């Protein structure tokens, strides 16, 4: 505790509240905040979309595939998961390509605390209340 905190406790409390608010805003001391994970995921999606569009543009430009052929293939593949949603389930895609599903990583959980046992051992039958 600083000497100033002792003489002006309201000032110290306000400073502490600002520090707590800043910690919560920046992720609360966690390694990665959910907001940061979402931003990183969106950046990954944007990069993959750019690569896909570049590949499609190169294939069309070189005459390997036409835009009509591409649209027909997209429609046919979209129907594989029985949902016409302009997308495909990644697990279905992995199965179609013969790729194995990535191992699921469990979220970190809190350590399990040992169960508390009653002190003094079991209660003798004659002292138990009828239940």
Image (spheres, rainbow, N blue to C red):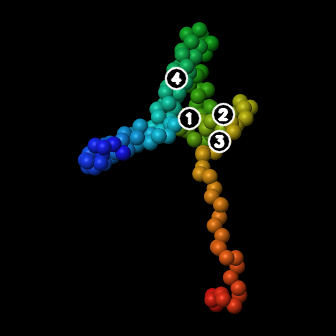
Label 1, label 3: how many angstroms apart (C-alpha)? 24 Å
Looking at the image, is mark 4 or mark 1 earlier in the sequence?
4
- Crowdedness near tag 1: few (<14), some (14–19) or many (≥20) residues, C-alpha within 10 Å: some
Q: Nearer the viewer, mark 4 or mark 1?
A: 4
- Crowdedness near tag 3: few (<14), some (14–19) or many (≥20) residues, C-alpha within 10 Å: few
The structure residue drawn at horizontal position 50% and vertical position 36%, both measured from the top left corner, is 32
Label 3, label 4: how many angstroms apart (C-alpha)? 24 Å
Q: Nearer the viewer, mark 2 or mark 4?
A: 4
Q: Secondary structure at mark 1?
A: loop
Residue contact at pointers 4 and 1, CB within 8 angstroms:
no
List x then y, in percent, for residue 59. Answer: 59, 13
Label 4, label 1: how many angstroms apart (C-alpha)? 17 Å
Asked if residue 79 can be seen in this view, the reply is no
Q: Nearer the viewer, mark 1 or mark 3?
A: 3
The structure residue drawn at horizontal position 72% and vertical position 32%, both measured from the top left corner, is 99
| Residue 105 - label | 3
The structure residue drawn at horizontal position 61% and vertical position 16%, both measured from the top left corner, is 65
Q: Quadrant of residue 129?
A: bottom right
The structure residue drawn at horizontal position 46% and vertical position 32%, both measured from the top left corner, is 39
User: Does residue 43 sit above or below 58 in this rendering?
Assistant: below
Residue under circle 4?
A: 47
Looking at the image, is mark 2 or mark 3 earlier in the sequence?
2
Q: Nearer the viewer, mark 2 or mark 3?
A: 3
Residue under circle 1?
A: 87
Residue contact at pointers 1 and 3, CB within 8 angstroms:
no
User: Does residue 58 sit above or below 49 in this rendering?
Assistant: above
List x then y, in percent, for residue 85. Answer: 53, 38
Label 2, label 3: how many angstroms apart (C-alpha)? 20 Å
Residue under circle 2?
A: 93
């Amino acid at each position: 505790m600083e000497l100033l905190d002792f003489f002006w406790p309201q000032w110290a409390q306000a400073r502490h509240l600002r520090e707590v608010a800043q910690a919560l805003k920046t992720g609360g001391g966690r390694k990665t905040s959910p907001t940061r994970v979402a931003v990183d995921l969106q950046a990954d999606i944007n990069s993959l979309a750019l690569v896909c569009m570049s590949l499609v543009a190169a294939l069309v430009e070189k005459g390997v595939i036409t835009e009509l052929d591409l649209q027909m293939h997209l429609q046919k593949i979209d129907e594989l998961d029985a949902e016409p949603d302009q997308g495909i389930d990644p697990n279905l895609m992995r199965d179609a390509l013969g790729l194995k599903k990535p191992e699921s990583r469990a979220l970190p959980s809190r350590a399990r605390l040992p169960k508390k046992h009653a002190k003094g051992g079991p209660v003798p039958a004659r002292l138990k209340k009828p239940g």
